Image (cartoon, rainbow, N blue to C red):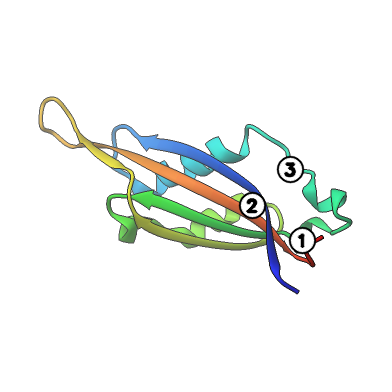
């Protein structure tokens, strides 16, 4: 059956002091998820475990994101997390470090026939 997208959630997060790309990514995911409660699985008659969840994290240093640790944030579903170039690194006024801004896009899909 074809993979059919049923939801898109977007969030942003920051690491203000430590320049921690994984922490900023975690906050971006929280921002996207904690504003809602998806009930699409039961609405389509699927168990929650059937959700296919694809996450893209955008930061300036994608290789610094621990994507495996971010999977633990999701209580169910088939989770795939990737990191790509994006977001922002903003220099601190005194020149001593950066503030990291991460963006997260979370796509929820199911294997199902289109109506």
Residue ID for mark 2: 74
Q: Is residue 49 above or below residue 35?
A: below
Task: Please say if the residues under marks 2 and 1 sit with CB atoms less than 8 Å apart.
Answer: no
The quarter of the picture where residue 94 lies is: top left
**x and y percentages locating residue 84 in the rendered image:** 37, 58
Left or right of 44 on screen, residue 58: left
Q: At numbered mark 1, what does the secondary structure look like: helix, strand or loop?
A: helix
Q: CA distance from mark 2 to mark 1?
A: 11 Å
Q: Which residue is mark 1?
A: 49
Q: Looking at the image, which residue is at 13% across and 33% down?
A: 96
Going 32% across and 61% down the picture, which residue do you hit?
A: 63
Q: Which mark is residue 100?
A: none
* Residue 108 pos. (x, y %): 65, 54
- Counting every numbered tag in the picture gives 3
Q: Quadrant of the C terminus?
A: bottom right
The disc at residue 38 is 3
Which residue does the image show at 43% across and 46% down from the upper left? 25
């Amino acid at each position: 059956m074809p993979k059919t997208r049923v939801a898109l959630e977007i969030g942003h997060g920051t690491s203000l002091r430590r320049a921690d790309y994984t922490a900023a990514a975690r906050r971006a995911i929280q921002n996207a998820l904690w504003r809602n409660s998806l009930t699409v699985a039961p609405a389509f008659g699927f168990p929650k475990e059937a959700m296919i969840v694809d996450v893209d994290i955008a930061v300036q240093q994608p290789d610094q994101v621990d994507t495996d640790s971010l999977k633990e944030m999701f209580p169910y579903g088939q989770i795939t997390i990737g990191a790509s170039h994006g977001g922002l690194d903003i220099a601190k006024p005194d020149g001593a470090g950066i503030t990291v801004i991460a963006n997260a896009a979370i796509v929820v899909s199911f294997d199902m026939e289109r109506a």
